[in-house]
Amino acid sequence: MSRTAGGVTMILQRLSRFSSVLRSAVSVHLRRNVGASAVAFNKQLDPIQKLFVDKIREYKTKRQTTGGPVDAGPEYQQDLDRELFRLKQMYGKADMNAFPEFKFEGSAAAGARRAGVLFEREKARQRALRPRVEKIEVRHLDAPRPGATFVLNGHLSTPLTCAAHLSEWHLRNSVLALVDGRPWDMLRPLTRSCDIRLLAFRDRDPDAVNRAYWRSCAVMLGCAVRRAFKDEYPVTLVRAPETPVSAGAFCYDVVLDGRLRGWTPTREDLRSLSKEAHGLIRRDLPFETLDVDAKVALEMFEDNRHKMELIEEKASQNPERTVTLNRFGDFVDVSEGPVIPRTGICFQYEVSAAHGLPGGEGVLHRFQGLSLPVHMRAHHVIWNRLLERSRKLVTGVGQKATERAAGGREARDETEAAAVPAAPDPGSVRHPAAAAAGGQ
């Protein structure tokens, strides 16, 4: 093998960790070109291989110009994604899929499919570890049957199973559970004998329910953004910062394609994003929850360094190094806490704003939205008032971590006060609308 071809091969190998698509192309290159001369190598280049060779030459030129290593981060990945999309249009999908170990897909679609497949595989693996059904006793603490004990199947039955044994009202209105005093997803299997309470939006203290609802709406926002921008303008999801309902909006932080630097959404853009979210609501998708080893989670999100950093952060908080994931439909995300049972619980839902964040070099944006559940609908006058407030930039919620993950040069101090009114007294909060309007 010539020195030139060998050098390109070595560079391809070193850069392969930045992209699963690149890894596939590397395998094709290694099979076809080991032992080829530099001239033969150049003659044999197919469009995909030529793309990567050109990008590597560009990378080397930048490195020589700067006199040091060049960060092959999100912009490098997005550049590759754009070029692959153009190649698909130029050569046709059939030609792009002709390579034995390479099937062309946009990065968002491929990443979502891989995460979904790995999620399902891990769920099946965990079930296989428990071939025998273990019986557990679950004691319900509240009305209408305080002290009632149900004999259920461990690792299979959920709080929703308990609700079904109690009444139709509990089945329709329970949004969250307290398992031995700890907030617990309604569709998350119970693992041991325990005491349980079922929570609804109209409870005297709905704080935990409101936070779960807000968190769920934020995850749906991330999915809507990813779907709306598609693969022509690939976006990278960073995280959904934990935002109090009193902030007036839930959030998801996203790194946009470099071509959208400084982008400001129009009303039509926001309407399109809201339409994507309403599609999720109409499908009434269940929220699944799964605890996995950090290594499994890292494999699911290997193309997203922001998620990988978040996974490492979550794993470091427990000795087992486990991470909790949520899934609805084909969308998988790192869990920030308990969520609602289904997307159909949302009723009024609107993506209200997208703000550029400092330190993100013009591509880091915070998308914001507002939603109310089907159990609590607001008059259009109240809704419009809440919606106007939700357009203000929410600050002071995980901004330092987000900017650090996105490579921002200067991260704001997390102690910066949020530009929202103080939260109302918990006893007066009946649902997210009341909480969001509390300071007005």
Image (cartoon, rainbow, N blue to C red):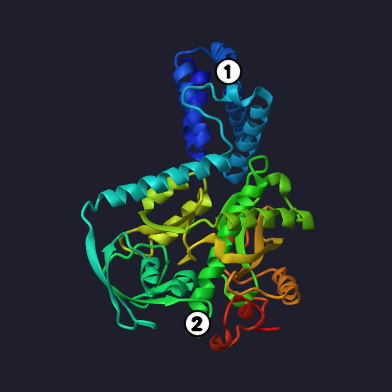
* Residue 263 location (% of width, % of height): 75, 53
Name the residue rendered at 76%, 56% in the picture: 264
Total numbered labels placed on residues in the image: 2
Does 273 sit above or below residue 83?
below
Q: Nearer the viewer, residue 282 or 354?
A: 282
> How dense is the environment of label 1, judged by Cα within 10 Å: few (below 14), some, or many (20 and up)?
some
Which three-letter amino acid code belongs to the residue tagged 1?
Leu
* Residue 295 location (% of width, % of height): 37, 49
The kind of secondary structure element at disc 2 is loop
Q: Please name the residue that numbered disc 1 is placed on.
A: 45
Name the residue rendered at 38%, 83% in the picture: 142
Q: Nearer the viewer, residue 290 or 417?
A: 290
> Is any atom of residue 67 visible in this view?
no
Which three-letter amino acid code belongs to the residue tagged 2?
Asp
* Residue 159 location (% of width, % of height): 38, 68
Q: Please name the residue that numbered disc 2 is placed on.
A: 203
> Is any atom of residue 210 visible in this view?
yes
